[in-house]
């Protein structure tokens, strides 16, 4: 059973990260909410600028919801050794990281926790993103309480 602690979407659909370090992509929002813990963070950036989303995903850090703070990528020597054997997107990402590409001081191989990622979403994507948290009301009832005051709820039987 999944216990999602973070749920979000940009341009390619919903995804979730669970307590065990796993993740899922695709599917409907309610599928993630049904298995989310109380207080799970939610962000929705599907109306944000497409180019800004691509830049953040490709050049920015990876979101790790169980991390508090920042974990910087430090093994550039290993990345340089691996580069000739990498193909397609993996080659491009590694080359970009080695070249020093970044978003707001974070590289594409760095990891950031929720506080840092939320700040990046807000500053890089602007008004095109909204934030909320899952509230578990009972074993069968859950809502997302969005920071803009809206609520979105489900009853799972």
Image: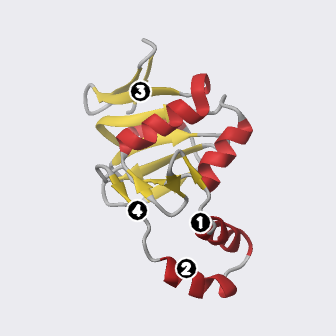
Could you say whether the residue bearing mark 3 is in a helix, strand or loop?
Answer: strand
Mark 1 secondary-structure assignment: helix
Whether residue 1 can be seen here: no
| Residue identified by numbered label 3 | 132
Label 2: few (<14), some (14–19) or many (≥20) C-alpha neighbours in 10 Å: some
N-terminal-most mark, 2 or 3: 2
Q: Which residue is mark 2?
A: 79
Going from N to C along the chain, the mark reached first, 4 or 3, is 4
Image: 111 above or below 148: below
Which circle's residue, 3 or 1, is located before the other in the chain?
A: 1
95 vs 150, left or right, is right
Q: Pinpoint residue 50: horizontal percent, then vertical percent.
A: 72, 38
Please say if the residues under marks 1 and 2 sit with CB atoms less than 8 Å apart: yes
Name the residue beneath numbered marker 4: 72
Determine whether, in the image, residue 17 is placed left or right of residue 78: left
Q: How is the image coloured?
A: secondary structure
Mark nearer the N terminus (1 vs 4): 4
The quarter of the picture where the C terminus appears is top left
Secondary structure, mark 2, is: helix
The residue indicated by pointer 1 is: 97
Q: Position of residue 28 (x, y in %)?
A: 56, 39
Question: Could you give the CA–CA distance between mark 3 and mark 1, rounded to whole angstroms?
Answer: 31 Å
């Amino acid at each position: 059973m999944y216990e999602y602690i973070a749920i979000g979407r940009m341009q390619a659909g919903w995804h979730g990260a669970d307590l065990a370090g796993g993740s899922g992509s695709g599917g409907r929002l309610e599928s993630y909410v049904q298995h989310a813990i109380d207080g799970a963070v939610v962000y929705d950036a599907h109306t944000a600028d497409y180019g800004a989303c691509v830049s953040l995903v490709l050049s920015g850090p990876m979101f790790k919801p169980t991390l508090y703070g920042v974990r910087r990528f430090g093994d550039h020597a290993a990345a340089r050794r691996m580069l000739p054997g990498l193909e397609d997107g993996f080659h491009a990402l590694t080359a970009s990281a080695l070249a020093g590409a970044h978003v707001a001081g974070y590289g594409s191989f760095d990891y950031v926790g929720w506080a840092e990622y939320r700040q990046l979403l807000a500053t890089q994507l602007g008004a095109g993103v909204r934030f909320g948290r899952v509230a578990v009301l009972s074993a069968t009832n859950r809502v997302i309480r969005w920071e803009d005051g809206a609520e979105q709820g489900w009853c799972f039987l």
